[in-house]
Structure formats: C-alpha cells, structure tokens
Amino acid sequence: MSATDTQDPNRRDFLYVATGMAGVVGAGAFAWPFIDQMRPDASTLALSTVEVDVSSLTPGTSLVVKWRGKPVVVRNRTPEEMKSGEDVKLSDLKDPIARNANLPSDAPATDANRTTPGKEAWMVMVQVCTHLGCIPLGQEGEFGGWFCPCHGSVYDTAGRIRHGPAPENMAIPVFKFISDTKVLIG
Amino acid sequence: MSEGHSTYTPTSGLGRWFDARLPLPRLVYDSFVAYPVPRNLNYFWAFGGILSIMLVAQILTGIVLAMHYVSDTHLAFGSVEKIMRDVNSGWLLRYMHSNGASFFFIAVYLHIMRGLYYGSYKAPRELLWILGCIIYLLMMATGFMGYVLPWGQMSFWGATVITGFFTAIPLVGTWIQELLLGGFAVDNPTLNRFFALHYLLPFMIAGVVVLHVWALHVVGQNNPTGIEVKSKTDTVAFTPYATVKDAFGMLVFLLVFAYFIFYMPNYLGHPDNYTVANPLKTPAHIVPEWYFLPFYAILRAITFNIGPINSKLGGVLAMFGSIAVLFVVPWLDTSKVRSAVYRPWYKLFFWIFVADAIFLGWLGSRPAEGSYVAMAQVATLYYFAFFLVIMPLLGLIETPRRLPNSITEAVLEKNRGSGSAHPEGAAASPETRG
C-alpha cells in the first residue's frame, strides 16, 4: 500500500483527477437545462407549416404570409421578370448557390433552381434580408427585384443578392404546390 | 493609498461597540471622509460620482416601472402607453428612465474620455480600467434590451438587426441566434427573456462597480498631471473637498438632465418607436439609440470581403473589435508619461479621435449609401489606427514636455504662472491656496 502510494502517478492523483472530471461533467449536466430552456419551445416549433391559397394571384402580384414569425412572399412573376432572372450569368452572382431547401445544398443559383419545376413563374421565398434580417421592399432596386432599405442590399427578380452587404440569396423554404391554387410551406 | 492606517476613532460607546463587531462605519469613514484625494483634481473627476447616482436612479425608476409594465407582445406597447397616460406620475418616471439611460451614457463617455486623456489606464490601474470596460459592456447590453421592451417598431427591428449579428458566426451562428430569440424571429419568448435580463443586468453592473471602486481605492486616483501622489501635501481629504466638488458637478449634470426630462423628453428617442412593432414591415430607416451610433457606423463601413471573411462577418468583427480594443489599451500605450498634458502629439491625436468618434456617430445616423459609406470607412480606419498604430508608436517617438517633480510642484507652478500678472499675489505664500 505505502509502496504504491509513492509511485507517480499514485492513487491519490487518480482520485483527484477522477473527482475533478466527475465535477466538470456534473456541472455541465446541471448547466444544460438552463441553456436548453432558451431554445425555441414546442409551441413555436408547432407553427412550422402553413397552407396558402394563391388563386387570387395574377402575374405581377404577390402576397405575404407569416411563417415561423417571418414573412414569406409568394409572387406570380411576369414574363419580363422571369426573363430578366433567366438572362443572368451565374458568374455575375455574388452568391452562386440556389439556397433552395428543396434542392441539394450545392445546387447552382439558376432562375429555375430558385423556383419549383413546372411552376417557374412562382417565387416562394423567405422575404428576409440575409444581411441582418430586415424585410426588403418588393419590386424595387436596380434589378426590379427586392431592395433592403436598412443597409442597401439589392436582389434580382429571383431573390438573388446582386449588390450590397448581404452575403447570400434570400432563402427558399421547403414548399410544394398541393394543387394548382394551394401552396404548402414548411 | 487606502492601505495606510485608519484614522477612524469612534466617539460614542455605541460606536466603539459597533466598530469592534462590524467596522462598517470605519469603512465609510476611510472611503468617503478621510480618504486622501489628489489636490489638483478637475471637474472631469466628478463623473464617477455622477455615474453612481445615475445607476441608482435607473434602478429605482426601473423597479417602479416594472410594477406597471407587461412583457407580452400583445400588451407591452399598450402597458407603456398606460404608464404614460393612466399611472400617477407614470409619465415622469418613464421619461426619467428613458432619458436616464441617455444621460448614463453621456456620463460614461465623458468618464472614458477622461481616462484616455489623462492616461488613467496605465500601470498600476490596468484592472481598474478593464473593470470599467466590463461595466460599459454590461451597460450596452442593458440599454439595448431596455429599448426592446416598449415593443415599438425600432424596438423590434433593432432587436432583429442586433441579434442578426450572431448569424454572421460560421457554423453555429443560426443556432446561437435561435437560442437568444427562443424562436425563429423576435417574438414573445424574446421579449420575456429580455425583460428578465434587463432587470438582472443593472445589479450585475452594481456588483462590478463595487470591484471598480475597490480597485480604485487600492491604487488611488489618477490626476491631471498623471504623477503619482508622493507626499501628504499632494492630497486633500475627500470630505469636504471632493464631496463638495462632486456635489456641485452632480447638480449641474442633473440640471441638464432635468431640462431634457421636462422640456425635450423625446429628443433623444425615435418617433418610429411610438408605432407598435410590426414583424412584416421594416421601417424605411433603422437607427439604434444615439449611444450606439458610432459602432453602428463601423458595422456598416465593412462592405467588402477581407480574404475568407465575408463583409457581414467582417462588419460584426469590426464592431465588436472596436469595443474589445479598449480592453488592451493599457498595453497598447507605450508612453512612460501618463497625462496628455505633457504629451503634445498625443493630445493632438486624442482630440482628432474624439472628433472622429462623434463623426462616426453622425454617420451612423445617416443612411448607408453613397459618400457616407466611404466617409465611414475612413473614420473607421482612424478609429482603429488611433489604438493600434498611434498609441504604440507615439510612446516610442514622442518627446514629452518636462514633468513636474510632484503634484504640489505642478499646482504651485500653475499658481505662480497665473499670479505673475499680480506681483502682490505672487508674493503671498502660495501654499495657502488650495
């Protein structure tokens, strides 16, 4: 016993380290619920899908619905808006990634990839500037898309960032047309 | 200085009994009566006391406002209007509290400028300075969360923009933002936790103030010459000299404060905050409270990518960096001389820095477009250059003016200088003058 106690590291060193580690794990486990309670709660998460009737939208009109506390714009684009979106070369884009939750995360930001197949006229997009979360104004700015008044980010008719401090294209949420006149978001 | 022997002698029997069991009166006597202060302190030394008064005033008005306020997104805006219209004296208490925040910041900016001008951060006062920086950070957090509570348009969009800073952090940014908001956007959970924290933080400030004052009493006050106290003739007793001077300074400060409360209570606020928050409509022009404007201008000045750092993260890093740099000022300044009084070049660059900070504040209130962006970039460059280039280099190349041997000598020299026009005055013993 006394012989083993004088060896380095001895039993006592082991006990110190083991007690210390148990203390750290215990403190972490105790702290977790205090951090965990701050995350979005069940009632917030429950609001994660909305169904929108878009039958009233003629080309060139849009409506905004609230989804997860954020505005989602549904826009029936005019042929000119679609054309100006399709004519953009990928190399001219600040963010070349589609940012479309319905597509793989590396899909290129073509006009088609910003919409859904067969419904290319329709933009369904979280209308929140990717800079610091302001709401851009529709059909404004030099590309006729969106313009954020807070810090001057300019988006094109497909909601892609073209100019200004925002780093990414505006996000396309998970959505699908469940009929010709109804969109399910989320 | 306070480590010297105590001169407190209780006069009554009760006083002696108390002193032997809990020497609290002794602590008060040693700290606020007999405490020796440099004899040459000017009115810029009154802001420590003014800040203490403002903290107490904010806590008092805040506690009574909390008795009428409701932290629910449907009721918050209405409850603030109820305070303004229905609650007895509610309008006064709310205006005291909202203008009090602004005046708290006016005082703290003058206090920080005083420290930068007279080199109050230099050894042995580094920890004193850092504790002050921590108080300033806590004040900013408190001020920001307090501004969200009335749930007006600026409250909502200010909270959205400022919590949006965290999304700039790579990988975990969005997770952190949702943790702060308790949702995907600013909403009821956000308002509730901001109210809880807005109530908590002032008491944390009070705690750090205790450490700040403790550290001050260990190292002693700096003074306009920046020379350490060397003998008893360099100091006067806190009471009555500093007490009366501080009290007069407070009076003048509170008079201006009262003028704002009664005659221009909304001058420092923003009219958009009298519109209830609307999550679907951003005001045309978002501006933070005036005391955040210089940092807001720095945030918006970074419109370009810096290597792998995109413009958004770059802006956020520059903004936090502009405050973080204050923490290392004691080690950035290489000069052996503390006070700008004896540093002709530092004095010049200091005043340019003050003008630059005010200019940044003005730019922060302008829209981020056209020539404003370029001006903000130049002003941001000077802001950082002052700390990171001028401070370290100037200490090595600047030739300071001759330093007096002591505070007493500096005071006597000054008196002799002003007395030279009146020979009869110079003949009188200068030591008799304060």
Image (cartoon, coloured by chain):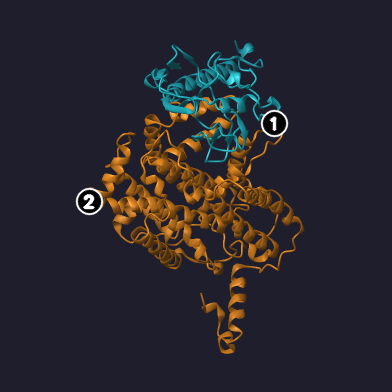
Chain colours: A cyan, B orange
**Kind of residue indicated by mark 1:** Pro
- Relative to B244, is B94 on the left or the right? left
Q: Nearer the viewer, mark 2 or mark 1?
A: 1
What chain is tagged by disc 2?
A: B
Earlier-in-chain disc, 2 versus 1:
2
Label 2's element? Answer: loop
Q: Please report, as a chain letter, where disc 1 is located.
A: B
Callout 2: 10 Å neighbours few (<14), some, many (20+)? few
State whether residue A97 appears in this view.
Answer: yes
Q: Name the mark on residue B308.
A: 1
Q: Is residue B51 left or right of residue B362?
A: left
> Label 2: which residue?
B88
Q: Is residue B423 left or right of residue B77?
A: right
Residue at 34 percent of width and 53 percent of height: B95
Against B61, residue A158 (above or below) is: above
Give the CA separation, mark 2 to mark 1: 57 Å
Give residue B167's mark: none
